[in-house]
Image (tube, rainbow, N blue to C red):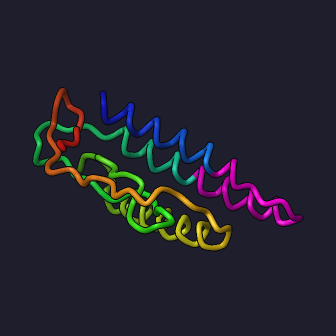
Amino acid sequence: MKSLQKHLWMSTFLCLFFLACLPDDGESSDYDQELETLTILKAQIESLAANSACNDSSDCRYIAFGSKPCGGPWSYLVYSTSIDTTDLENKVGQYNQLEALFNAKWGIASDCAVVTEPVDVICENNICVAVY
């Protein structure tokens, strides 16, 4: 549950952060389109991961998710191998690349805190959970 709360908090922070950095010139429609593309792709990825289920901890994986302007991911996405993991990993790679380009193009800034990578992922009640 803490992992979900942390993930929701991070998503809210990102949305508010992006809104605070809206461009002032006529390029806002490009900005809005690119942000919408990122938002849709992120929702698809999170939905795909959320629909995964595990029977055993060996079914669980995690992947670096997002691209902080200072470098590194925003978080680690936990998922199970019960889904199409190739599709998920491809979408996460695409998202990470698009977000890095978006950050550079629009001069997005963030804290430079390093996100802690899980030391393990385990299956609890058929849901993969990160262990820190």
Q: Residue at x 37, y 38 (%)?
A: 51
Q: Is residue 81 left or right of residue 15?
A: left
Q: Is residue 60 left or right of residue 107?
A: left
Q: If the image is split into quadrants, where does the C terminus sit?
A: top left
Q: Who is closer to the viewer here, 102 or 36?
A: 102
Provide the major secondary structure of the magenta segment: helix
Is residue 117 placed above or below 50 in the rendered structure? below
Is residue 121 placed above or below 90 in the rendered structure? above
The x, y position of residue 52, in whole percent, is 31, 41
The x, y position of residue 62, in whole percent, is 26, 53
Q: If the image is split into quadrants, where does the N terminus sit?
A: top left
Q: Does the segment drawn in magenta span residue 8?
A: no
Q: Residue at x 64, y 52 (%)?
A: 18
The x, y position of residue 60, in whole percent, is 19, 47
Q: Is residue 4 left or right of residue 58?
A: right
Per the rendered image, the range of residues in magenta is: 18-40
Q: Residue at x 64, y 57 (%)?
A: 37
Q: Does the segment drawn in magenta span residue 33?
A: yes
